[in-house]
Image (cartoon, rainbow, N blue to C red):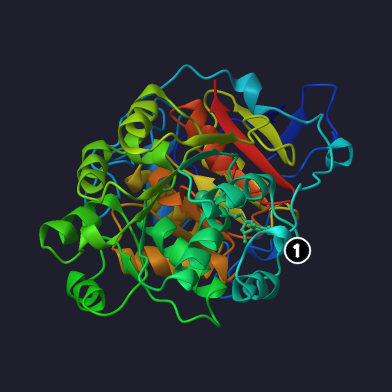
């Protein structure tokens, strides 16, 4: 762990040049150099700097931020401002995000010892060629660039191909999407009348699954309709009137379309619940029950979840037929994510600490988590004013703005994305070098999901958590 120290500054001070900020390690296990990282930076010295904007340390939004967030000189501690991220105003994606908070043991956020070099090499029992897949599917797997199945794919693909109901548990970033897409694409190729519905907690995740499906089926005649809120419903309705094989969407919009009788549930005999635990957390339990009760009894149902709390277990008992449970979860967090904590002493502004961190050369693509929609927006504004290329994503933005921010980040036009938990769940963005928890996550599960946005697949990533004390 390391402690961020700065000189005391007066509340609202916007001067940053020459600040004697040092990141100093207190532990003896550090692999990072103990030498201080100078806090001083110019906007153009960092890979994040916007070419058209100078540092602008005294910009109005920065001053506004400091005015509301500084912990110095009698100012109230920063609490992120605004409502928590889970609300549903303008498409937060959830009904009423359960605002559960846990006592968090920060020592769990530090993990320096594990190295990939010692990690066991996974040898799949099957090769993609061993699976009983249509040659067209095999061809598309190869053209997608996959050579070997991941552990969860290795185990669940044969079961799904046999027609079994499956409950899959695996760490984030381990290829669960392809684990259900590949066998279901195959099923449709064998019988073009088959239809699949995939239910995911957030719009972004549903869109991402649809994108992944489109990549897999480039040379296959397959149609999907993405049914998410925040997008025009009439377009979805007109697509649903045409031929389709997949519906991928969020529970609220799917239920809405079912109520309007636009989704003919009796025709859909394959269901995937992706990130089931998150959907229940977000208050979608009733919607999911309603959707599933309306589906034919002789269906195949898959449930993917990071954890299986009692409520999920109940849902599984109610809606899955003697499912096979597959868990390839070895530990909560992948070994390839290095975790660290930055302790921020009372009186110090964490925004200044963040600026200092972002100036480091190895922070090439950073996802920053804030607690509230308002706080996230404000933080991103400050970073932009400071000369960083930052975008934000949260439930108060329109869906098209959320998508365009995400695209900017994915395409590397912005290398900082500031997000709330709800907006970032399940997102697969390649090459995120760092996840920074600017505000603490509410629960350990949230923490695991946040940091799982980096170190995807066999890549390495770093997670840094700010802890004020
Ligand atoms: P999860 O749903 O488990 O969080 P994803 O399905 O989003 O994970 O996959 C994470 C990343 O791994 C994606 O970029 C995906 O393309 C990649 N991936 C999945 N399966 C394989 C595979 N067999 N070989 C190589 N990369 C894969
Ligand atoms: Mg996933």
Q: Is mark 1 within 8 Å of ligand 1?
A: yes
Q: What residue is at 66 percent from the left and 51 percent from the top?
A: 456
Q: From where the camera sits, is residue 59 visible?
A: yes
225 or 442, nearer to the observer: 225
257 or 107, nearer to the observer: 257
Locate residue 264 relative to residue 41 in the image: left or right. left
281 up-or-down from 295: above or below = above
On the image, the x and y values in percent for residue 176 come to 56, 50
83 up-or-down from 161: above or below = above
Q: For the C terminus, give its image quadrant.
A: top right
Neighbours of disc 1 within 10 Å: few (<14), some (14-19), many (20+) = few
Q: What residue is at 32 percent from the left and 29 percent from the top?
A: 99
Name the outermost residue toward the right. 117
On the image, the x and y values in percent for residue 444 come to 51, 27
Q: For the N terminus, give its image quadrant.
A: top right
102 or 147, nearer to the observer: 147
61 or 221, nearer to the observer: 221
124 up-or-down from 139: above or below = above
Can you identify the residue that label 1 sits on? 147
Mark 1 lies on a secondary structure that is: loop
Q: What residue is at 55 percent from the left and 83 percent from the top?
A: 219
On the image, the x and y values in percent for residue 344 come to 59, 28
């Amino acid at each position: 762990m390391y402690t961020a120290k700065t000189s005391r500054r007066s509340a609202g001070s916007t001067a940053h040049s020459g600040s004697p900020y040092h990141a100093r390690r207190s532990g003896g296990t550090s692999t990072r150099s103990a030498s201080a990282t100078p806090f001083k930076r110019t906007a153009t010295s960092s890979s994040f700097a916007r070419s058209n904007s100078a540092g602008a340390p005294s910009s109005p939004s920065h001053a506004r931020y400091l005015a509301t967030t500084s912990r110095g000189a009698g100012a109230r501690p920063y609490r992120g401002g605004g409502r928590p991220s889970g609300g549903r105003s303008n498409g937060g994606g959830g009904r009423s995000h359960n605002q559960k908070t846990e006592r968090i043991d920060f020592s769990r956020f530090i993990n320096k010892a594990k190295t990939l070099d010692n990690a066991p090499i996974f040898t799949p029992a099957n090769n993609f060629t061993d699976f009983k897949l249509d040659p067209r599917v095999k061809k598309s797997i190869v053209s997608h660039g996959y050579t070997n199945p991941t552990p969860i794919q290795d185990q669940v693909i044969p079961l799904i191909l046999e027609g079994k109901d499956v409950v899959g548990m695996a760490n984030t970033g381990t290829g669960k999407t392809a684990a259900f897409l590949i066998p279901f694409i195959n099923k449709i190729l064998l019988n073009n009348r088959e239809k699949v519905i995939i239910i995911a907690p957030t719009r972004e995740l549903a869109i991402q699954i649809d994108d992944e499906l489109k990549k897999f089926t480039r040379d296959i005649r397959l149609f999907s309709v993405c049914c998410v809120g925040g997008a025009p419903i009439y377009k979805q309705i007109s697509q649903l009137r045409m031929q389709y094989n997949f519906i991928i969407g969020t529970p609220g919009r799917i239920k809405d379309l079912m109520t309007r009788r636009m989704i003919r549930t009796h025709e859909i005999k394959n269901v995937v619940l992706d990130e089931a635990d998150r959907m229940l957390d977000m208050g979608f339990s009733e919607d999911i029950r309603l959707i599933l009760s309306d589906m034919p009894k002789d269906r195949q149902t898959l449930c993917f979840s990071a954890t299986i709390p009692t409520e999920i277990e109940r849902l599984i008992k109610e809606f899955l037929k003697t499912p096979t449970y597959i868990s390839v979860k070895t530990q909560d967090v992948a070994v390839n994510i290095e975790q660290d904590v930055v302790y921020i002493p009372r009186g110090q502004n964490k925004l200044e600490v963040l600026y200092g961190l972002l100036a480091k050369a190895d922070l090439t693509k950073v996802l920053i988590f804030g607690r509230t929609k308002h706080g996230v927006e404000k933080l991103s504004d400050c970073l932009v004013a400071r000369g960083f290329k930052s975008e934000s994503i949260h439930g108060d933005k329109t869906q098209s703005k959320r998508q365009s921010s995400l695209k900017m980040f994915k395409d590397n036009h912005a290398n900082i994305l500031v997000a709330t938990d709800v907006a970032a769940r399940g997102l697969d963005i390649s090459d995120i070098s760092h996840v920074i928890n600017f505000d603490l996550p509410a629960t350990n599960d949230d923490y695991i999901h946040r940091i799982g946005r980096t170190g995807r697949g066999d890549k390495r990533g770093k997670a840094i958590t700010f802890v004020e004390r």
